[in-house]
Image (cartoon, helix red, strand yellow):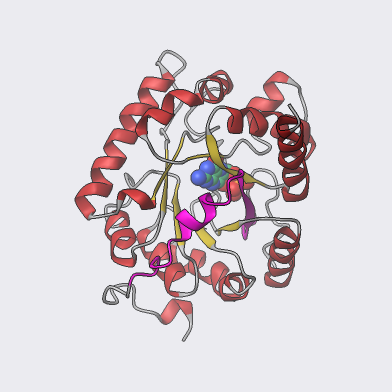
Amino acid sequence: MSLASQSVSHSPRAAKDASGTLARLLGAGRPIVMGILNVTPDSFSDGGRFLDPGAAIEHARRMVAEGADVIDIGAESTRPYGTATPVSLSEEVRRLEPVLAAVAGLGVPVSIDTMKAQVAAHALAAGASIVNDVWGLQRDPDMAGVVARHAVPVIMMHNRETADPAIDIMADIAAFFARSLDLAARAGIAHDRMVLDPGIGFGKTPEQSITALARLDQLKAFGLPLLVGASRKRFIDRVSPAPPDRRLGGSLAAHLLAVAGGARIIRTHDVAETVQAFRVAAAIRDAR
Ligand code: HH2
């Protein structure tokens, strides 16, 4: 059956997460590395590189070989910097269809990076087992229900339509998380399937992204695993000017400090280098 022809109102499936995808990942006792697979023409750092299904599957295969614990597939640029074109439901599903099942067969969990509940439902039916919503269940009113019905983990990311340099960004993130958690609880999403993400680069000035990284430990008060995605983001350019594909050093610095601040999952374009950085940091720490 093609992705596009699958009904999105299918009856609740047997608990997809019965084996505890998130608990198993976090049980590894080291930072979890989520490799980014953008099947898009316009992502801010790698748009167009993996739009071809063969190239996308090959890239996912390489990231798994390099040590990715999860592959995060997105077929619409999330527009962290407001420049990409919105994508229709059918186009998003059309981009995912030739890629999802193959990537889900690589042996690591696949998360679907989408703001549309129907895309999430299609992807979960086709092999994804985690939902990554860059609007924290607050954009599409059906998203929380889809996550609850499929009984899968969900990443709820902080976001804002526009950055406001005048606000207290940590207070804004905390208030946003409280709304997301309320929506999740009302829909019946289990607490042990929730992940929070401060949304580096989304609705934030570069300085606010740096603040969110610097004060990440405050968000541990929510008692949930934290995910950080600082990979190649614009705040790096503000500190040390470089185009997106030349921001590896800044990404590694941010991710190492994010882990020190409490992040359990790191979302990155550069899996091999990130895995190496975490292994070296752990070896030095263990030798203390
Ligand atoms: N960042 C991007 C996309 N999705 N999801 C989570 N949970 N956290 C993030 O920080 C995050 C995300 C943006 O990065 P990228 O996917 O490379 O760009 P684009 O959205 O333009 O495809």
Picture quarter with ligand 1: top right
Q: Which quarter of the picture shows residue 110?
A: bottom right
**Residue at the spot x=62%, y=60% of the render?**
39
Is residue 82 something that shows in the picture?
no
Spot occupied by residue 45 in the image (x, y as percentages of width and height):
69, 44
Look at the image and say whether residue 250 sits in the magenta stretch. Answer: no
**Residue at the spot x=62%, y=57% of the render?**
40
* 123 w.r.t. 155: above or below: below
**Residue at the spot x=67%, y=32% of the render?**
256
Range of residues picked out in magenta = 15-42
Quarter of the image containing the C terminus? top right
Q: Which quarter of the picture shows residue 267?
A: top right
Is residue 47 something that shows in the picture?
yes
Look at the image and say whether residue 26 sits in the magenta stretch. Answer: yes
Q: Which quarter of the picture shows residue 107?
A: bottom right
Q: Residue furthest toward the left?
A: 186
Image position of 254 (left or right of 100): right
Spot occupied by residue 242 in the image (x, y as percentages of width and height):
78, 29
* 96 w.r.t. 190: above or below: below
| Pick the front one: 215 or 248 | 215
